[in-house]
Image (cartoon, helix red, strand yellow):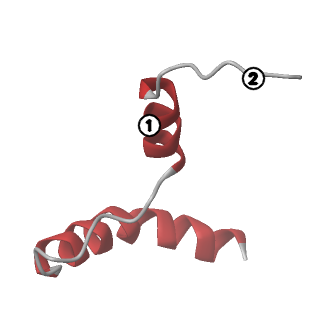
Amino acid sequence: MLEQLDELGEVLPTLRAEFAARRPENVPDAPTHAARVAAKLAEPAVEEVTA
């Protein structure tokens, strides 16, 4: 199994590049953790209001 993971790690960058090059322009990028964190940090701070 570890050998298969190593092989996947070798071809994964090529696969990602090929899929990105062939993706139609109307299809958005998949959400990533980094993108979600950046979006969260860009949001204005919202204070909780308690009554």
Which image quadrant for residue 5?
bottom right
Q: Between tags 1 and 2, which lies in front? A: 2
Disc 1 marks a residue whose amino acid type is: Ala
Location of residue 44 with respect to 39 vertically, above or below: above
Q: Residues within 10 Å of mark 2 (few under 14, many from 20)?
A: few
Residue drawn 37% across and 71% down?
Answer: 11
The residue positioned 49% from the left and 72% from the top of the image is 8
On the picture, is 9 further left or further right than 49?
Answer: left
What is the residue that sits farthest to the front in this orientation? 51
What kind of residue is marked 2?
Glu
Where is residue 40 drawn, in percent x and y? Answer: 52, 33
- In the rendered image, the quadrant that contains the N terminus is bottom right
Write down the residue under mark 1. 39
Please give left or right for residue 45 compared with residue 48 in the image. Answer: left
The residue lying at 30 percent from left, 68 percent from top is 16
Q: Disc 2 designates what residue? A: 48
